[in-house]
Amino acid sequence: MSPELIHAAADNRWAAIAPEISLGCLALFLLVLEVFLPKKKHVIIPTLAIVGQIGLLIGFLWNLRDASFVAHETFNGLLRHTQEGQFMRVFFMLSSILVSILGVIALAKQKMPKIEFFHIVMVVSAAMMLLTQSNHFVLFFVALETVTVGFYILVSYFRSSPLSLEAGLKYLITGALSSGILLFGIVLLYGVAGNPTLPGSSAESMNFNALRVFLEANPENFLASVGIVFVLAGVAFKIGAVPFQIWIPDVYQGAPTPVTAFLAVASKAAGFGVLLILTQRVFPSYSDLTTPVLSAMAIATILFGNLAALTQHNVKRLIGLSGVSHAGYLLIAVIAANTQPLAIGAVYFYLFAYLLASFAVFGVMTHIAGPNDADQDLEHYTGLAKTHPFLGAVLAIGIGSLAGIPPLAGFMGKLFIFIAAFKAGLYTLLAVAIIGVVVSIYYYFGWIKAAYFETWSAPVLDGETDTRPTRTPVGLMAGVTLASLAAATIVLGFYQGALGQWLLTK
């Protein structure tokens, strides 16, 4: 064996990706159980999936207790392990657990295979964990496409619903388009950075470190600029930023509610994790290009998301469009990170606060939804606080955090981003963001108004006076989960503790 191969093999540290391997093995184990267990015992498999993921998360957190973490690369530069990457690993594992819990509730209302849902969720989560640690465009693209293909299946999982199938088709078309745009940008960068006539060129130009060296040596290269813009456009599809957000309302409405939560939280977080890697580690020498592009995108995203959400009555479309505006706020932090390190921690803190609030809201939505999962209107929430006080309280806390109402975690997340933007001198973006927050209060509190201050009075239709779907009783596991999310949202608003210190002092 050649010395080069021996060296390459020595750098394949499989222990470094033990969480991803464990999650993938657990996903495969579920399929094995489905084959060998009697059908009447299949009901225990979702519980095993959730318990297994919780065990993996606890084990990973236990291994992270050593604070002396040093960034390093493995697999010959394909992966770069950083503290931010470890945070995102925890984030995606937690998201996978919460999606699985919501999946148990949602799938109980459907007559279709269930085990495959949990399998795909875990595979997608493992791919996201690799994506946000990628240090090479090959791994970056493979991990991203694994995530995307998994979502193609999950979005249209309720195949008996025409809206779910329509959402899957639309996501397939727009996802393929975004992948093409992204791949075109990668090819341009690879081609120009591998040109031996240019300074800093390298045969390893797909590696982020080598590409950064080339871009620093060629700060105004036209083809590199075009490639960067195409790569940013491809990532913008994933985070739902304007003008690449057109798929969001229909896909969010048609997808199963747990999948909508997965898209809104984990997929968006993966996109911003990647965007920070690209802007801070690969493209910093082209900040004169990326800053105006992302600034224009942020302004349009905040305004479009909030204004379009004003007219929505379907809550899945409403929360989808509000999620567009949240992408705009996060884009401001990404821009501010060019000069303010505080902004990087603000992005991760905001994402975690967004996870808590969003899953609390989606948890309530999963209980309110009937078999026709896409049909979720504001009218279905009238009188919720009176008939189901617990769900009403969780909904109010989640929505209040998303709206940025003090002292909830969402308020602190927005405050940290606004402080970073102010310190970076992004006054125009800050003004637009404040306007967006004010506008969002109208449609967020319209939802709370329906739950707390309105009474259901449906017209008589075919002898029935209540046409709302039957609300699912809150079980022990779901109740503990929703209570924990609501409590964490409140506590994190008052006290950021070790999380805030770790993220915001880096």
Image (cartoon, rainbow, N blue to C red):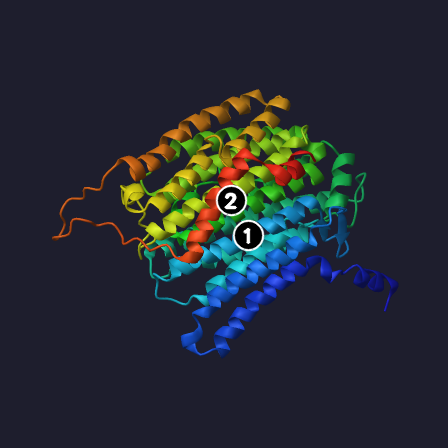
Residue 214 left/right relative to 31: right
Say which of 330 and 505 sits in front: 505
Say which of 415 and 347 sits in front: 415
Residue 39 left/right relative to 385: right
Q: How busy is the neighbourhood of tag 1: few (under 14 within 10 Å), some, or many (20 plus)?
A: some
Vertical order, 429 against 330 (above or below)? above
Residue at the image position 51 percent from the left and 51 percent from the top: 176
Say which of 363 and 327 sits in front: 363
Task: Please identify the quadrant where the C terminus is shown.
Answer: top right
Position in image of residue 289 (x %, y %) = 64, 30
Position in image of residue 406 (x %, y %) = 48, 30
The first of marks 1 and 2 along the sequence is 1
Task: Please identify the quadrant where the N terminus is shown.
Answer: bottom right
Q: What element carries label 1?
A: helix
Does residue 229 appear in the picture of this structure?
no
- The residue wearing badge 1 is 94
Q: Residue flagged by tag 1: what amino acid is it?
A: Leu
Vertical order, 355 against 2 (above or below)? above
Q: Do the residues labelled 1 and 2 touch (CB within 8 Å)?
A: yes
Residue at the image position 40 percent from the left and 27 percent from the top: 439
State the mark number for residue 281: none
- The residue wearing badge 2 is 355
Q: How busy is the neighbourhood of tag 2: few (under 14 within 10 Å), some, or many (20 plus)?
A: many
How far, Cα to Cα, is label 1 from label 2? 9 Å
Q: Residue flagged by tag 2: what amino acid is it?
A: Leu
Position in image of residue 453 (x %, y %) = 28, 35
